[in-house]
Image (spheres, rainbow, N blue to C red):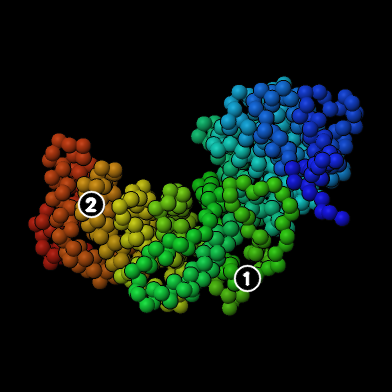
Amino acid sequence: MAQVEKRGGLLRKSSAYKKPLKEKVVLMYDEIFMTEDPSKCSPRFWEELFLMKVNLEYLEGKLESLDGEELMKIKDNINCLFQHCIQALGEEHPIRVVNALQTLCALIRGVHQKNKSTSGFDIINMLMGFDKAELCMKNLMESLDSLLCAEGSESLKSLCLKLLLCLVTVTDNISQNTILEYVMINSIFEAILQILSHPPSRREHGYDAVVLLALLVNYRKYESVNPYIVKLSIVDDEATLNGMGLVIAQALSEYNRQYKDKEEEHQGGFFSALTNMVGSMFIADAHEKISVQTNEAILLALYEAVHLNRNFITVLAQSHPEMGLVTTPVSPAPATPATPLGTTPPSSDVISSVELPLDADVQTSNLLITFLKYSSIVMQDTKDEHRLHSGKLCLIILTCIAEDQYANAFLHDDNMNFRVNLHRMPMRHRKKAADKNLPCRPLVCAVLDLMVEFIVTHMMKEFPMDLYVRCIQVVHKLLCYQKKCRVRLHYTWRELWSALINLLKFLMSNETVLLAKHNIFTLALMIVNLFNMFITYGDTFLPTPSSYDELYYEIIRMHQSFDNLYSMVLRLSTNAGQWKEAASKVTHALVNISPETTGLSFEQITMTSSFSL
């Protein structure tokens, strides 16, 4: 028997003797796309429709093939289909519910896709009708809420979340999606929290729930009161917050694992053998080939959690076994519409404080460590605009963490030492550090290492000014905490000082090119102020008197750089140009540093320092 062809809704191709045979559901779709009411001739039309397996491809293709005028002619039938889909969600028969959910996805996507090229109709009016929109969306959201909270099929819950994600992501700009006004009014926030707080539900649907929440929080967040923002900011349930942290940690850990696998594969291949023979002249090009799709959706969720909910800060430090060393069986995912945002959720939730007890032989980690590793990968390559924005979001999250008092407390806690293996960009003048040689240190050391790494590896033609400013801000906030609380951190400060001075040298040597695009004096002032902070208050947070000596030694050793900076800003501050005011600020800030401006020698400067332990 010949194989049946179902492409395009056809069960059999047409021939000279036989007419093409279509699926019954396709024939029913064709009736809906007529101007007549399909239920006039067949009273049981809508009941039968939702017993038929949905043909998403045909339904969306049919919507796409119509122009604006043709679509408006069948508006009443589309409204009717939408309303009957909502009614079917209340049916006891699960097949009807599944088919209704998938049909709604196809309708929402198809109509919005058509509206991108034809703006002659309103989406809400086309799907539901203005007069019935409020009631339709109320019934839809209530049905979805009930399905998500019920102890029913996990596949049904997955489809509900996919429908909601489809509803949220059909427009490029989420704040232009007017249908979400009804989602704001009819909140599903509690249903999302229930999924995150319950381990079995979290394993199946945690990723979609976290992404959905992050997107809803961003709907017109600066224009009006968003109820999801208000509710997220006051969540204090430990199980819910831990669940959210576990989902985010797993997604970031999955990215780290994929990158590490590709890196090892790359290093062990033919290219590695070739570079051993001809040297490392192409090492930067080799690095660029290691590419793993980033996950901005989960990164956005982490930002919103850290930014809005102070209780979430405690989740960052909660220890769990190092992900990647622990494996669990992978359950097959249910067939659902395409995942939005181009991101793929992790296959399973492999961490849980209950399910995976800590093992003394397993390296412990936490969400912050996982995030730092993720950031060290993403921030390596900022030439691509996509990764540039991703790196910026990483630095914004780190800024939020560095500003928080409790976060600083565990960052600087000597009793919480971890070995953090950050990824370092391959460079010709340095060798890759061996993982086994990494010391166990407070987490703030890893944050400072990440900032130093960024500073020394991004001095390039396409200068990421905004990222550098945020990077220096993170360092400044950490130093402010150490000064305030008199925390004497045993850190290799010389690496930071050297990186900052080299950054000043780069700004000066590329003054003409950079000033055409950026106000480099803002960044220069921040760097000079960091040195001023070390000079003025170093006795409160530098670990030993010798550290203070190293600071002054580094300043005197590189005095030419500070002298050149002073000459540059003095020249611009005395001219009536665009940069006069900005350069003047740097001139005044340099008074505390440059021996040329103070008239003091190295010996005189060191004598003025009062280091007291």
How far apart are the two marked residues, 2 and 1, measured between alpha carbons? 48 Å
Marks 1 and 2: in contact by CB < 8 Å? no
| Badge 1 element | loop
Question: Horizontal placement of 53 versus 267: left or right?
Answer: right
The quarter of the picture where residue 453 lies is: bottom left
| Badge 2 element | loop
Residue 239 appears anywhere in the view: yes
- At horizontal 22% and vertical 69% (from top left) the residue drawn is 549
**Whole-percent x and y of residue 511?**
21, 49
The quarter of the picture where residue 72 lies is: top right
Residue receiving disc 1: 326
Toward the viewer: 281 or 382?
Answer: 281
Q: Residue furthest left?
A: 599
Q: Which mark is residue 84?
A: none
Q: Which amino acid lies under the numbered mark 2 shown in the image of this protein?
A: Asn
Which comes sooner in the sequence, label 2 or label 1?
Answer: 1
Question: Horizontal placement of 26 versus 320: left or right?
Answer: right
Toward the viewer: 351 or 36?
Answer: 36
- At horizontal 80% and vertical 38% (from top left) the residue drawn is 26
**Whole-percent x and y of residue 553?**
19, 67
Q: Which amino acid lies under the numbered mark 1 shown in the image of this protein?
A: Val
